[in-house]
Amino acid sequence: MSLYAQGSMLQGVIDEPFIELSYPVRGRSLPADHGYALYAAIVHLQPAVRQESELSILTVPGIPDREGKILLTEQSHLRIRVPVSKSRLVYALAGKKIRIGKHEVLIGIPEVSLLQPAPALRARIVTLKGHTEPEDFLAAAQRQLDSLEITGDIQIPLNRDKAPSRKTIKIKCHTIVGFTIEVTGLSDSDSLTLQREGLGGRRHMGCGVFVHSN
C-alpha cells in the first residue's frame, strides 16, 4: 500500500501522519547560510508552500569550505516534512532547477518515508523570539516542550570552546540568533510529536526541525 493510501485511511481516525521527502541535490556548492534563500527559491516554484504552516524544510548538508560556502556531495539531500495530504505539493519540486544566489542546483527524485521515532533528537538551530541568552533560551524551550506535553531532557550542547552552541541565520538584512538543542529520553509518541511540531519559528527555513541524534 502506498504512503498516500495509508494517509487517506488514517486521516480522521488519528492524527494525520507526516512523511519526509529526501531529494538528492546535484550541483557544486551552496551558501553555508542558505535557509532563507532556499525557502524563497522553493516558494518561487510552489507559491502555496508559503501557506503551509505544518511544513518543515531542512537545510542541505555539505562540506564547509571556510569561505562562506558548502561543497555538495553525494550525501547532500534536501529534506522536507509535510502531512501526507500535502505531499503532492512538494513532490512537484522533483526534477526542478533552483537558483540560490549564484548557485544553481538540480533537485532530484525524492525518497519518501514515514517519520520514525528515536529516543534522542537534535535540532541544528532553534530560534525563539526575544530569547538570545542560553539560560533564558533553554527555559523558554522547556515551556514549549511542556505546552506540547512532551517529556524529555533538553539541553544546549557545548561547542569546541566549551560554550553553548550558538547559531545564527540571516534573513534578508537581519541576523537571527538561536542555539542547537538536544532532547533525550523521549518516548516513541513524544519523539514523533517533536519531529512533527518542532520548536520555535522559521521551520520553513530550517530552524527548529529535529532529526535523529547520532
Image (cartoon, rainbow, N blue to C red):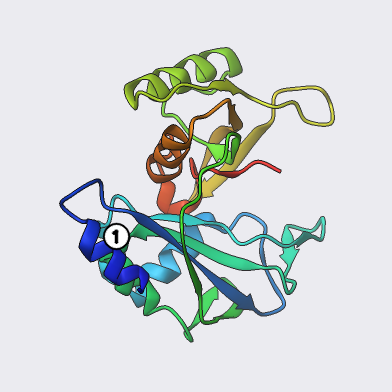
Residue 106 is situated, as x and y percent measured from the top left of the image, at 57, 82
Question: At x 36% / y 68%, what residue is drawn?
Answer: 3
Question: At x 46% / y 19%, what residue is drawn?
Answer: 142
- The secondary element bearing badge 1 is classed as helix
Q: Where 142 falls versus 212 (above or below)?
A: above
The N terminus - image quarter? bottom left
Name the foreground residue: 173 vs 72. Answer: 72
Residue 37 is situated, as x and y percent measured from the top left of the image, at 50, 62
In the image, is 128 to the left or to the right of 184? left
In the image, is 53 to the left or to the right of 164? left
Determine which quarter of the picture holds residue 4: bottom left
Determine which quarter of the picture holds residue 196: top left
Name the amino acid type tagged 1. Answer: Arg
Q: Where 207 falls versus 112 (above or below)?
A: above
Question: At x 61% / y 75%, what residue is drawn?
Answer: 25
Determine which quarter of the picture holds residue 31: bottom right
- Residue at the limit of the structure toward the front, as seen here: 1
Q: Residues within 10 Å of mark 1 (few under 14, many from 20)?
A: some
Residue 76 is situated, as x and y percent measured from the top left of the image, at 67, 68
- Residue at the limit of the structure toward the bottom, as seen here: 95
In the image, is 84 to the left or to the right of 31? left
Find disc 1 in the rendering and name its residue: 50
The C terminus - image quarter? top right
Question: At x 39% / y 75%, what residue is drawn?
Answer: 91
Q: Where 59 falls versus 177 (above or below)?
A: below
Q: Where 158 falls versus 33 (above or below)?
A: above
